[in-house]
Image: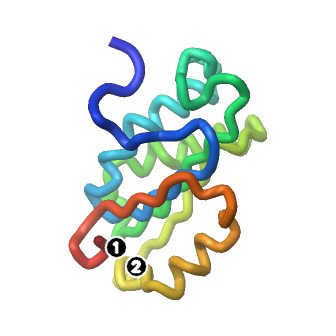
Amino acid sequence: MRGLVGKGLCLQSEGVHIAFTTSTGVLAFLDLAALLLRVNLGLVSAQSVPFLANKSNFKLVIYASFNKEEDYPGLSLLEGLEHVTKEKKLKNFALVKCAGENSIERWNEALIDWELKPYLGELAKVYVAGSPAVS
């Protein structure tokens, strides 16, 4: 079996996909992050991934909110992907970390509007996954 399986995230090849996540909410995006890492490392051809083929401008931005790093599954994978993406001067992934006791409450309507503003005109999807306080 290759690629993503199931109903999935309804990814589009054009535009920015933004995920606001807390704790286990990130699990829905780890397969995608692992695939992007393999593509960015050159282990998988972008042409073999439908939403990355034909010089797409796909980008995934994950906002990771957590109290403690050890409470956020997959953080090392996301940090590794962020490192590889920057090192290879690619633009298909970004990670924004928010840590601390009030990190979940941080995502209020005004701040989300502020964070989305740079992507206006490019937004393909916005996902919210995590605790009920975020959703």
Query: Disc 1 marks which residue?
Result: 67
Q: Residue at x 53, y 40 (%)?
A: 12
Query: Disc 2 marks which residue?
Result: 103
Residue 77 in the image: x percent, y percent? 45, 42
Q: Is residue 17 above or below residue 135?
A: above
Q: Is residue 33 left or right of residue 83?
A: left
Going by the numbered disc 1, the residue's amino acid type is: Asn
Residue 130 in the image: x percent, y percent? 28, 64
Residue 9 in the image: x percent, y percent? 38, 43
- The answer to whether the residues at label 1 and label 2 have Cβ atoms under 8 Å apart is yes
Q: Residue furthest right?
A: 89
- Closer-to-camera residue (13/88): 13
Q: Is residue 39 left or right of residue 104?
A: right
Quadrant containing the N terminus in the rendered view: top left
- Answer with mark 1 or mark 2, whichever residue precedes in sequence: 1
Q: Residue furthest left?
A: 132
